[in-house]
Amino acid sequence: MAMQPHPGPPRRRRAPLRRAASAVLTAAGIVYFLLDALALHVLAPFLRWLGRQPLVRAVERRVASLGPYPTLVLVLVPLVLLEPLKLAGAYLLAMGSPAMGLALIVGGEALKIVTVERLFRFGRPKLLTIPWFAWLYRHAAAFMDRLRASHAWRMAARAAALARSAGRGLLRRARRALLALLRPG
């Protein structure tokens, strides 16, 4: 009688709680990264202008002369200081102060993107020389790739494109109406 190899432990199905948690985290990730992508898109012209300024170029050269770990600190400090502003803004919104809450969220996000995005952009090559950072970056990039490939992301991107198109049309009509009002005669 030939011995059959042991099939090993039975494959476990993902627990329903784990599937639900995964879905919630994916949804939260989509919302978070969509808001960041929207803010980055809105701030892109300003970031391009900022990148051409002599003072910013001098700071970029100085940061380029630093090692990987000082560069990491430069990226993390504004991130750690500014990211909690969104939570504080959400708290103010929940407590009935919508203007202050939105101002804190929008202002904090704008400051975070302007500082962290610029620092990360020209510090990335040095940061990727840190092994654990490179590992985290690869995994975060893979997560973003999966997120962008998801149906929910595509639907949100389509909705954003429609909103952008509608906004442009509305601005064109408003501009024409304003010019018509300002024309003499």
Image (cartoon, rainbow, N blue to C red):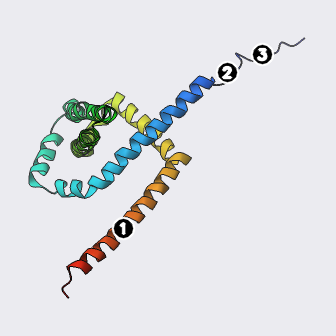
Q: Amino acid at mark 1?
A: Leu
Q: Marks 1/2: CA distance?
A: 54 Å
Name the residue beneath numbered marker 1: 170
Earlier sequence position, callout 1 versus callout 2: 2
Q: Secondary structure at mark 3?
A: loop
* Of the pair 33 and 105, the residue shown nearer to us: 105
Give the residue at x 34% y 73%: 173
Quarter of the image for the C terminus: give it: bottom left
Name the disc covering residue 180, or none. none
Number of other residues with Cα within 10 Å of mark 1, as a class: few under 14, some 14 to 19, many 20 or more: few
Which residue is denoted by mark 3 in the rendering? Answer: 5
Residue named by callout 2: 12
- Labels 2, 3: front one: 2
Q: Are marks 1 and 3 in contact (CB under 8 Å)?
A: no
Determine whether 133 is above or below 114 in the image: above
Choose the circle earlier in sequence order: 1 or 3: 3
* Coordinates of residue 95 in the picture (x, y in percent): 31, 31
Rendered residue at 49%/43% (across/down): 147
Q: Position of residue 78 (x, y in %)?
A: 21, 35
Q: CA distance from mark 2 to mark 3?
A: 20 Å
- Residue at the image point whose x is 31% and y is 50% from the top: 40
Considering the numbered disc 2 on the image, is that residue within a helix, a strand or a loop?
Answer: loop
Tell me which residue sits at (54%, 34%) in the image: 23
The extreme right residue here reads 1
